[in-house]
Amino acid sequence: MFNAFKFAKSAGSKLLDKKQGKDALTEQAKKYGYDTKGMDYDIDDDGAVVVRGKAASQEMKERVLLAFGNVAGISMVKDEVEAEDGGAVSTFHEVVSGDTLGKISKKYYGKSSLYMKIFDANKPMLKNPDKIYVGQMLRIPTDEKTPTASV
């Protein structure tokens, strides 16, 4: 069983050259300091990235999947990755018109004041908590200490 996450194909940082495929994705992960060790990935003809293998942690797995998906030209990321640590699985949120990190925080945690938790979970992809864009996919970490609002 695998998960597939849809992305806005026209949103995100520019892929250098689709022909570079795996090399371009590797550079994208390196740009953010993400560890892809144990993972294998490629871009199919439809602009979907298939990622397989084992990640060091659930958090790293999710960060790599998002880094790949938030690239212009990528329509979907197919997740066939196991996390070695069995950590808590995050929720993913697609930014829509009118969203702010505060509004997203209120939706998932019941408090807008916890927006920095979302910002921190998406760094370094996010550089400013006020700069998110429609179609961008964000990690919403799960934490036993933070109550979740009904989604």
Image: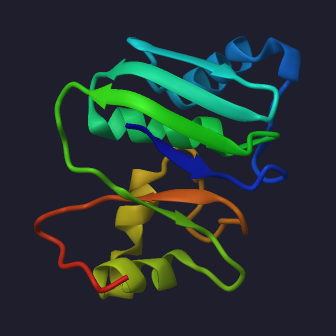
- How is this picture coloured? rainbow
Q: Position of residue 82 (x, y in %)?
A: 30, 28
Q: How many marks?
A: 0
Q: Quadrant of residue 37?
A: top left
Q: Quadrant of the C terminus?
A: bottom left
Q: Residue at x 70, y 12 (%)?
A: 23
Horizontal side of residue 71 vs 130, given as left or right: right
Q: Residue at x 71, y 63 (%)?
A: 135
Q: Position of residue 112 (x, y in %)?
A: 39, 85
Q: Residue at x 86, y 15 (%)?
A: 19
Q: Residue at x 28, y 85 (%)?
A: 149
Question: Compared with residue 73, is residue 15 higher up or lower down, i.e. above or below?
Answer: above
Horizontal side of residue 60 vs 13, given as left or right: left
Horizontal side of residue 149 vs 45, given as left or right: left
Q: Quadrant of residue 29?
A: top right
Q: Quadrant of the N terminus?
A: top left
Question: Compared with residue 149, is residue 131 higher up or lower down, i.e. above or below?
Answer: above
